[in-house]
Image (tube, grey):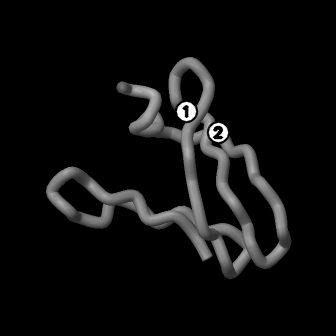
Amino acid sequence: GGISVISPSGDLVEFVKFDDPYITNICFGSQDLKTAYITASHEGLLLEVKWDREGLPLNFLNK
């Protein structure tokens, strides 16, 4: 499994592969939003990964 990075125009920028075949969710944290928290469902793990790009904040935090 993995995470597809998609551009605003809808193009595939990158595919980040993980060993777990069932990567199901991603959210971003830390002050710079460059820490990804990713669920690996097959292994039952929550992964913390340094991410090259700034992620988007959770929408409900912006209200």
Q: Which mark is residue 34?
A: 1
Q: Position of residue 21 (x, y in %)?
A: 68, 81
| Quadrant position of the N terminus in the picture | bottom right
Q: Which mark is residue 50?
A: 2
Residue plotted at (77% across, 54% down) = 46
Q: Residue furthest left?
A: 9
Asked if the residue under mark 2 is in contact with the one under mark 1, i.e. CB atoms within 8 Å, the reply is: yes
Picture layout, residue 56 above or below residue 6:
above
Horizontal arrangement in the rendering, residue 11 relative to residue 51 (left or right): left
Picture layout, residue 13 above or below residue 60:
below
Q: Position of residue 10 (x, y in %)?
A: 20, 63
Q: Secondary structure at mark 1?
A: loop
* Circle 2 crowding by C-alpha within 10 Å: few under 14, some 14–19, many from 20: few
Q: Which mark is residue 63?
A: none
Q: Position of residue 8 (x, y in %)?
A: 20, 51
Q: Secondary structure at mark 2?
A: strand
Quadrant of the image occupied by residue 41: bottom right
Horizontal arrangement in the rendering, residue 36 relative to residue 52 (left or right): right
* Circle 1 crowding by C-alpha within 10 Å: few under 14, some 14–19, many from 20: some
Report, in whole angstroms, how far the alpha carbon at label 1 lies from the one at label 2.
6 Å
Horizontal arrangement in the rendering, residue 32 relative to residue 56 (left or right): right
> Looking at the image, which is closer to me, 44 or 17?
44
Amino acid at circle 1: Lys
Q: Is residue 54 visible?
A: no
Picture layout, residue 62 above or below residue 3:
above
Residue plotted at (52% across, 22% down) = 32
Residue plotted at (57% across, 54% down) = 26
Q: Position of residue 48 (x, y in %)?
A: 73, 44
Amino acid at circle 2: Lys
| Quadrant position of the C terminus in the picture | top left
Residue plotted at (83% across, 68% down) = 44
